[in-house]
Image (cartoon, grey):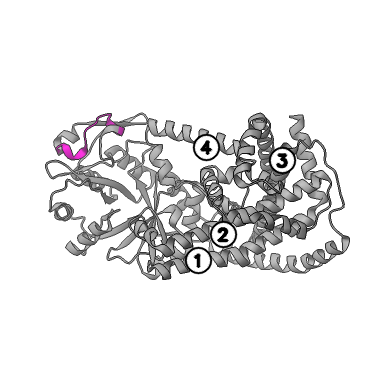
Amino acid sequence: MKRAQRVLTHAFQQIFEHRIEYVRTFLVVRGIQVLLFLPLTSLLFYCMYTWTGFDAITEHNIGKFLAHPYAIFLVSVWLLCCILFIYYELGFYFLQAYYQQKGMPYTFNKIWRRLHRKAVYFFSAQSLVIIAYVLLLIPLAAFLLPVTLTQQLQLPAFIVDELMHSTRGKWLYGIAITVLGFMTLRLLFTLPIFIIHPHLSIWESVVQSWQFSRKKLFETIVLLATLLVTYSSMLALIIAVAFLPLWAVERFLPVAALPVAGITLTLLEVFLVTMFTVLQALFSHIIVSVLYNHSHAVFHPPTPQRLRQTYRKYIRIGAPIVILALIVTNIVSLERSIYAPDTLIIAHRGFMSEGVENTISALVASVEAGADIVEIDIQQTKDGEFVVFHDATLNRLANRSEAVHTLTLAQLMAIEVTADGHRDMIPSLQQMIDAAKAHDVTLLVEVKTHGYETPDYLERIVAQLADNGVLSTYYVQSLNNTIMEKMEALEPRLKTGSVYAFHVGSLPTTDTDFYAIEDSSVSAKVLEEARQKNKPLFIWTVNSERSLQRYLEQDVDGLITNNPHTAAKLRSRLEQDEYFLTRVFHRLTIIF
């Protein structure tokens, strides 16, 4: 622990002593990102769409897209750009930390030249090693690698959700995360070794990281844990203090609350961006310290004073202008955020925390939690009826091996399903409709196919909805867009929707009435395009409070969630005249 405290103390000293250099590094990295990487990425994706003839890429056409020779080339170029950006961003911080701890003089040009010399390795087959390394990090990248691009890397929520719905899945997920975490820690030194050592290849750096971390694994974990605790504590304390003026103004001088809220939000945004840069520098110092066993810091005059004065001049002129513009923007944004969102809360398979998914008890719990719509899954049974069930087999919920399509509706309705301590019987579609009517809630019916449906199964669904008088009020969706377009043609009064688990580019052209797109594929462009097409957009599966808050503030059409109680509470809170302090806090959690 003393070693960890000493390393962190010296790291803070070095960062403070070279603070101007870190400001320059921040400006250089963000400049490359904004002026080069982002425009180049936009150009590459534009070329992907125009050269290949694909307006949109989804799980339905990604195979055909990747079969196009231009697609493989452009995706490879984009991956190379991402890797190079990560390399240069981390390279600046690792080399600065190395030079500072060794007490060696350096200049930005020296760092540039050193990084350029080794960038040639990324134009060889060894770049595949780094691609595999980054892909390996995806589940843990935002926690273990403080790089701008990796902060958005994560597994799609629906994959994790599906795993967490069964005991076996939970065990598999836990084991996978443990193994990936172990491998990530063992390979954590790959990039710093490659960057600092002038003659090592990427693969040689991987081997050295694996060998070196065997003896330093515990020390690395302690240092990273200490960094996390220290960093989080500092953030929490400073943010709490920063909120005090706004708290006082809202209670004793409410007329000034809006401008003070705008100023508070701006200052905290600047502070958090600065602290992320500090985190990158601290991370670099810790890794370099472990690699080279530096037990003390050696201060060295970082750069000529003339260079410092030049940058200070630019900062003194530019910073106030940028901050003032941010304050005005935030004041306008906070003022406009006082509204009652019309977002529909859609309970995914019912409220699964209070009942078994796709059962009557889960539907009732959804209504009590405040859901507007309950999403259910239906399949056709052996005798041509419709049962409410998600999986193709009964294994996960009933511990039976039969497939749904091999049993009649009566047989399925006699089976008890269990999950997380809850028990219920498998319901028919008719039972679910009756329960929904009794509790005055709308259904979103997702049609699941298993390949053994009768030729007229779509007509049967339409007929059953019509017989119950819910043809124009219920929603029907499917991952199979062809099915939905057939249902739309059969009965235009139906609210049909196309479901996409993966989407890049423009919204696909479809005859259906609404879109249902997985959370990680949704962007501001997608939301705007859906509004221009005048088609509702339901986003699935949105579970975290942060994501729910973000989409509610954007007033999206519908949120499919496993946590309808949380979504309803957040929506209700937005409908009320809450304090600006709360709104500022929520805005920060959305941005960061």
Q: Residues within 10 Å of mark 1 (few under 14, many from 20)?
A: some
Image coords of residue 57 (percent x, y): 39, 61
In the rendered image, which residue does mark 1 sit on? 44
Q: CA distance from mark 4 to mark 2?
A: 25 Å
Q: CA distance from mark 3 to mark 4?
A: 21 Å
Q: CA distance from mark 3 to mark 2?
A: 27 Å
In the rendered image, which residue does mark 2 sit on? 81
Q: Amino acid at mark 1?
A: Leu
Which type of secondary structure does the marked residue at label 1 adopt?
Answer: helix
- Point out which mark residue 14 bears: none
Q: CA distance from mark 3 to mark 1?
A: 36 Å
Q: Amino acid at mark 2?
A: Cys
Dividing the picture into quarters, in which one does residue 62 lie? bottom left
Which mark is first along the chain, 1 or 3? Answer: 1
Please say if the residues under marks 4 and 2 sit with CB atoms less than 8 Å apart. no
In the rendered image, which residue does mark 3 sit on? 286
Q: Residues within 10 Å of mark 3 (few under 14, many from 20)?
A: many
Please say if the residues under marks 2 and 1 sit with CB atoms less than 8 Å apart. yes
Q: CA distance from mark 2 to mark 1?
A: 10 Å
In the rendered image, which residue does mark 4 sit on? 180
Which mark is first along the chain, 2 or 4? Answer: 2
Which mark is first along the chain, 2 or 3? Answer: 2
Q: CA distance from mark 1 to mark 4?
A: 31 Å
Image height check: is 563 above or below 220?
below
Q: Amino acid at mark 4?
A: Leu
Which type of secondary structure does the marked residue at label 4 adopt?
Answer: helix
Dividing the picture into quarters, in which one does residue 390 lie? top left
Numbered disc in front, either 4 or 2: 2
Q: Which residues are magenta?
A: 396-408
Left or right placement of residue 167 versus residue 465 in this view: right
